[in-house]
Amino acid sequence: MARQADYQTELMYNLNRFVDDNITSRPVETVPGIPEGCHIAQGITGDYIAISALYAEPEVLTLFAAKYSKIELDHYDEIINELAADFLNLHNGLFLVNLSETENVESTLTPPVSASSGEPLKAYSDTYVMPFDFSFGTVNFVLSEK
Amino acid sequence: MDISDLKILICDDSLLARKNLRDGLKGLGCKNITEVFDGQAAIDAYINDRPDIVFLDIVMPVKDGITAAREICESDPDAYIVMVSSVGTQVHLREAIKAGAKDFLQKPATPEQIKNALEHISGGEE
């Protein structure tokens, strides 16, 4: 069952809660596959199956990670990806808790992986890009649902 | 036992989660804190150091936290394990308890929750 809209709603809430309360979501794009250049990806398995990922310009992701972690960060490196992975993991976990509590849909997560150095991520049938505009740039979240 | 005397093991693959937990514990006066990054390392560290309390993530590479909790509790049924996870569903909670965990904190864990977990173990040993 398609849950992209619920995922996006909860993502907006968690971005507001944990990163920045001044953000705007842009229209969702349906895309043929997971875009190249994703920094981080995380699988969702169980009753609901999907792949989540995110990408942004390196300097934007650095500012995103700094805002989220409240750590001073001035250049893009692997730590930025780790911090972005932490946010993705936190959001996905909270999304699954909500799914479990409201619909008895039980899923779990696989460990986040760095997506930029490995093989291209294989998409499921429906793949969406959800862009969110921050004051410092745009971060794109990807959800590919089975 | 005083909270500051507790021997604590943190196991989480997330750098930020480890930092937040470590900062929270240090803020409570804890000094003896060991950090590892995956479930197998947690088992090894537990067997070597016998910490008083383990904060254990669930979703981790190499070996997940539920499996690690089960193996730690098989080696020491009195192990005091607190699962700390973003995936705090009832299913995960039940799995954690079945594996031997004594408590479960939904990420992001608050300083108050961390303090409560420590008071439980330190009070239990008085």
Image (cartoon, rainbow, N blue to C red):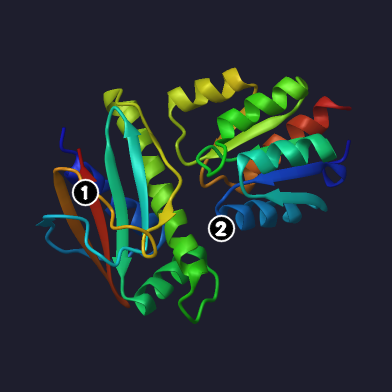
Indicate which disc residue A89 carries: none
Q: Quadrant of the C terminus of chain B?
A: top right
Residue B30 visible in the displayed image: no
Q: Residue at x 27, y 58 (%)?
A: A141
Name the kind of residue labelled 2 in the image: Leu
Q: Position of residue A8 (x, y in %)?
A: 23, 50
All told, the count of numbered labels is: 2
Chain of the residue where label 2 is placed in the rendered structure: B
Q: Which residue is mark 2?
A: B16
**Tag nearer the camera, 2 or 1:** 1
Question: How busy is the neighbourhood of tag 1: few (under 14 within 10 Å), some, or many (20 plus)?
Answer: some
Q: Position of residue A32 (x, y in %)?
A: 11, 55
- Residue at far bottom of view: A74
Q: Residue at x 44, y 24 (%)?
A: B90
The residues bearing labels 2 and 1 have C-alpha atoms spaced at a distance of 28 Å
- Residue at far front of view: A119
Q: Quadrant of the N terminus of chain B?
A: top right
- Residue A92's place in the image compared with A130, above or below, is above
Taking the image as shown, residue B1 lies to the left or right of residue B56, namely: right
Name the kind of residue labelled 1 in the image: Ala
Q: Position of residue B79 (x, y in %)?
A: 75, 27
Taking the image as shown, residue B35 lies to the left or right of residue A4, namely: right
Q: Residue at x 16, y 50 (%)?
A: A127
What secondary structure is found at the residue carrying circle 2? helix
Q: Which residue is mark 1?
A: A123
Q: Residue at x 73, y 43 (%)?
A: B9
Chain of the residue where label 1 is placed in the rendered structure: A
- Residue B12's place in the image compared with B51, above or below, is below
Residue B44 visible in the displayed image: yes
Quadrant in the picture for residue A105 = top left
What secondary structure is found at the residue carrying circle 1? loop
